[in-house]
């Protein structure tokens, strides 16, 4: 089968679920044409990452948060439709996975092709005030004109089901099978592995560092004075982005991973599971999460929900004490969260011929 992915992500950005799903489908023998973030300029020449994965691109001149201006939206949608029609004309497309919330016109381009809308972020919640009503209408219309809608969190799913009741949860997964970590009596550090940006609760993390807990930060860093100050702390260490497989020396010193999302940062509130959470669990590291309202359920000791720095300290101390005894529980919890489970879910949707009759989508108003 040949899949088309429509995204606003460049392939060379740090991996997200759209990259992981593309790689999963390729590993299962499918072809993927991955349309990257649209550009106003730059080359549109296709690039072959491997024999079954092609990177493509098209042009767009209007930022999606300006689409509350109806004339701009109509012009840009027409322009994108025209380009996509030309670029897919010679492709035999078996399924489309669309990650864009504002593309209700896709049904007109793919009238007989299974069309999946994958909502992987809170696009409506993160829209600016002027654009938010339009963003909500566009997302609803995009889902309604698709055959199936998948969401990466419980909150996004609840919102999607208001318009498309048959929407389903589609969580990230562990790309590596669980392996029992080596015994190390000195496992008393924490690992932060991922984007180091404004989504972090800097107050809690700094207080945790002040209390003597050592935190290893690994990932891409945003240009933020608070981050620079945090990484300069005596109990903080930093490394640029690296796969966990290259961090064995760090992972083997850690009793848990910390995911300290800022509860005041609205887009964080939609998270049910970090894109990297199951991956960290596959290395035996329990997760110290901020107490986000829609986190998935997990056995005690696998995922800790922390409201304050005192909660983080207590969770860290418990993770140190229970590290060895929790490994079987972590392993069992991961049984339903491997790539095979997500692949079966996706293919079942396509085999069942998802959904309902759809007409070309449109959205009115400004």
Image: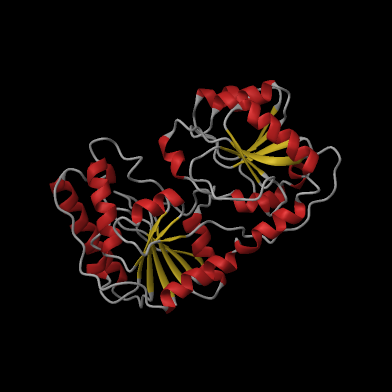
* Residue at the spot 31% in from the left edge and 55% down from the top edge: 162
Q: Is residue 65 above or below residue 227?
A: below
Q: How many marks?
A: 0
In the foreground, 66 or 332: 332
- In which quadrant of the rendered view does residue 219 lie? top right
Q: Is residue 17 above or below residue 358?
A: above
Q: Is residue 78 left or right of residue 121?
A: left
Q: Position of residue 4 (x, y in %)?
A: 39, 67
What scheme was used to colour the molecule? secondary structure
Residue 43 is at least partly visible in this image? no
Q: Position of residue 130 (x, y in %)?
A: 23, 36
Q: Position of residue 142 (x, y in %)?
A: 28, 59
Q: Quadrant of the N terminus?
A: bottom left
In the foreground, 203 or 2: 203
Q: Is residue 67 left or right of residue 241?
A: left
* Residue at the spot 24% in from the left edge and 70% down from the top edge: 358
- In which quadrant of the rendered view does residue 267 lie? top left
* Residue at the spot 76% in from the left edge and 47% down from the top edge: 248
Q: Is residue 93 left or right of residue 282?
A: left
Q: Is residue 71 left or right of residue 222?
A: left
- In which quadrant of the rendered view does residue 108 lie? bottom left
Q: Position of residue 61 (x, y in %)?
A: 25, 48
Q: Quadrant of the C terminus?
A: top left
Residue 230 is at least partly visible in this image? yes
Q: Is residue 2 above or below residue 127?
A: below
In the foreground, 96 or 228: 96
């Amino acid at each position: 089968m040949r899949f088309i992915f429509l995204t606003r992500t460049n392939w060379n950005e740090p991996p997200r679920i759209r990259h992981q799903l593309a790689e999963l489908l390729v590993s299962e023998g499918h072809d993927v044409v991955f349309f990257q973030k649209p550009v106003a300029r730059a080359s549109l020449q296709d690039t072959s990452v491997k024999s079954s994965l092609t990177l493509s691109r098209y042009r767009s001149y209007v930022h999606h948060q300006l689409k509350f201006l109806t004339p701009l939206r109509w012009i840009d949608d027409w322009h994108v439709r025209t380009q996509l029609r030309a670029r897919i004309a010679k492709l035999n497309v078996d399924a489309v996975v669309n990650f864009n919330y504002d593309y209700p016109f896709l049904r007109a381009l793919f009238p007989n092709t299974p069309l999946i809308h994958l909502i992987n972020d809170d696009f409506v919640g993160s829209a600016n005030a002027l654009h938010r009503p339009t963003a909500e209408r566009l997302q609803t219309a995009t889902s309604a004109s698709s055959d199936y809608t998948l969401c990466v969190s419980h909150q996004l799913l609840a919102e999607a089901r208001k318009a498309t009741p048959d929407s389903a949860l589609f969580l990230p997964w562990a790309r590596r099978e669980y392996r029992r970590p080596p015994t190390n009596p000195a496992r008393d550090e924490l690992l932060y592995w991922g984007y180091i940006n404004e989504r972090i609760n800097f107050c809690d993390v700094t207080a945790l560092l002040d209390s003597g807990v050592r935190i290893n930060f690994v990932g891409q860093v945003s240009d933020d004075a608070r981050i620079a100050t945090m990484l300069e702390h005596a109990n903080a260490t930093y490394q640029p982005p690296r796969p966990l497989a290259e961090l064995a020396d760090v992972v083997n010193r850690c009793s848990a991973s910390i995911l300290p999302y800022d509860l005041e940062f609205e887009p964080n509130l939609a998270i049910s599971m970090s894109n990297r959470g199951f991956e960290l669990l596959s290395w035996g590291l329990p997760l110290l999460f901020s107490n986000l309202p829609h986190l998935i359920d997990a056995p005690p000791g696998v995922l800790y929900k922390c409201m304050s720095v005192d909660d983080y300290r207590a969770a860290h101390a418990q993770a140190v004490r229970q590290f060895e005894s929790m490994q079987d529980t972590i392993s069992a919890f991961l049984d339903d969260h491997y790539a095979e489970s997500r692949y079966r879910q996706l293919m079942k949707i396509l085999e069942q011929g998802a959904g309902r009759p759809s007409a070309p989508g449109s959205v009115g108003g400004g």
